[in-house]
Amino acid sequence: FDDGAWTVGQGGVGFDGSRGAPLQSLVLTDIEDVMRSKNASVYLRYTFDADTENPAIRLKYYFDDGFILYLNGRRITSVHAPSTPVWNSRGNHELAEARANARFLKPFYSRGGRSA
């Protein structure tokens, strides 16, 4: 997959326009200018090296509205996401108040080596 034309930034990515901005401290790459009232979806790609002898991965993630997590092209988990997403899908649940929903994903396994 060629992601060479994508914008480069640091995680966490997002914006928090809610009063008090409870998620803002988690945002290192603010995308409000390109998202608010313009786009419903954002695609992020992180690459990492998994240990080939012990490729278990544990992920802690924060979200507001919804998301889908893929590992090497395979859907691993989703929250408040359509079953058949398209490029501009919206989360199918909007939180009444913006807050960080921290969840841990059960350990799952990479193939080891470079993953995305």
Image: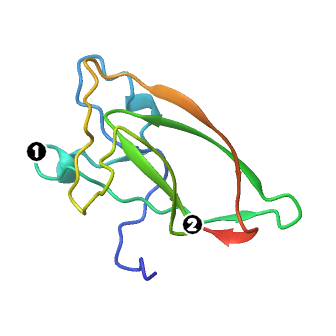
Comes first in the chain, label 1 or label 2: 1
Q: Nearer the viewer, residue 8 or 61?
A: 61
Q: Nearer the viewer, residue 78 or 21?
A: 78
Instruction: Give percent across and percent down for residue 64.
Output: 35, 32
State the residue at coordinates (29%, 48%): 82
State the residue at coordinates (82%, 62%): 51
Q: Amino acid at mark 2?
A: Ala
Compute the Cα span from label 1 to label 2: 29 Å
Query: In what element is the residue under mark 1?
Result: loop
Within 10 Å of the Cα at label 1, are there few (<14), some (14-19), or many (20+) other Cα atoms?
few
| Foreground: disc 1 or disc 2 | 2
Residue located beneath label 2 in the image: 116
Residue located beneath label 1 in the image: 37
Instruction: Give percent across and percent down for residue 52.
Output: 83, 67
The image shows residue 79, relative to residue 94, as above or below, that is below
Query: In what element is the residue under mark 2?
Result: loop
The image shows residue 35, relative to residue 44, as above or below, that is above
Give the position of the C terminus as an image quadrant.
bottom right
Q: Amino acid at mark 1?
A: Ser
